[in-house]
Image (cartoon, rainbow, N blue to C red):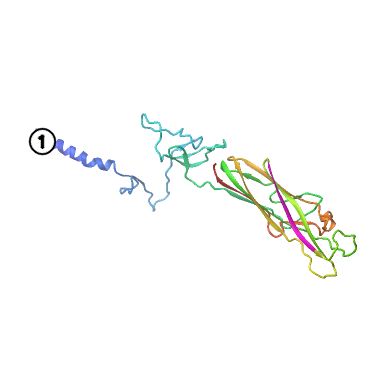
Amino acid sequence: MLKTTYKFCFISLALLLLTPMAFSQVGINTTNPEGILDVYNDPVPVPKYGLVLPRVSLTATNVMAPVTNPKAGVTAIPVGTTVFNTNVSATGTNDVTIGIYSWDGTQWIPQFNQEQSELFESDTFSLRSRSDTNLTVTGINGSSFTADYTGMYRIRVSVNYGGGGAKVPNEGSGGSRSDGRLNIARQSGTFTLTLGSDTYNFPVHSYSTSYDSRVGATNYFAIWQEFNSTFYKEYTENEVVNMTMIFDQDPATEFVDEGGNASFSSGRGYVAYDIPCTVEITYIGEQ
């Protein structure tokens, strides 16, 4: 009877000593785990392996399903539950894309940077504009943008324009529109940008000078000015936005050939003379 008692006490003591070890740390490929779970990749052997997270198909950031809590009687999943989402939604709100998400108690939070920024530039410098026809801004015109995420995008537009050659004044004749020794002429026009179904207009202008030949001074033209505008637009994930850009020069009676109606006239204005016109679209977050 005494022998049986000793045997029982030994087994009980062994179980008591082993119990904390069973519930302390778990090591995979290591006998010395440094956390509650330590997955170790030996630096010497190859190949290497990664940790595969549970793969699920989420439908929206504010919908917990299809992930559930395995504990009986508990419907909510714990804060910090992490999965790899395999689905892409494009409803226009609370959309998800492929990547790692963690549950914060009310919604799935992406564990990756949602960044997108694209720059579109005119590809030909010193485009010459005429007052009798629209000018297509090549490089931007005909481009398209595809939204990677659902949310708000910042659109920055930069255009520049310089006036052509102004008419030389004819002092005392009365026949010139600019009598005197100096003609300071203003040339203007409008850039029109379309993004999908939206149209944006950007009026611009520039000044040129022309002296009477008897003065012997320098005439100035192509003194370009830059015009910038920033606005915001919501797009849906995978939405394709087609764009066009044209420039329409206003009638310019104080410029050579009325603003360059002739093909090679010096009165034609300058678009993207030294620097390109640009359209930059940047994702700034879901609203």
Q: In the image, what residue type sits under mark 1?
A: Lys
Identify whether 201 is placed above or below 187: above
In the rendered image, the quadrant that contains the C terminus is: top right
User: Is residue 264 part of the magenta span, yes or no?
Assistant: no
Identify residue for label 1. Answer: 3
Horizontal side, residue 19 vs residue 248: left or right: left
Where residue 48 appears, x then y in whole percent?
A: 42, 48
In the rendered image, the quadrant that contains the N terminus is: top left
Looking at the picture, tell me which residue is in the foreground, 128 or 220.
220
| Boundaries of the magenta span | 198-209
Where residue 95 appears, x then y in whole percent?
A: 53, 38
Q: Main secondary structure of the magenta part?
A: strand
Task: Residue at 68%, 58% (x, y): give it.
Answer: 275
Secondary element type, mark 1: helix
Horizontal side, residue 97 vs residue 75: left or right: right
Task: Residue at 63%, 45% (x, y): give it.
Answer: 145
Where residue 136 appears, x then y in whole percent?
A: 74, 50
Q: Quadrant of residue 54?
A: top left
Horizontal side, residue 50 vs residue 88: left or right: left
Looking at the picture, tell me which residue is in the foreground, 1 or 62.
62
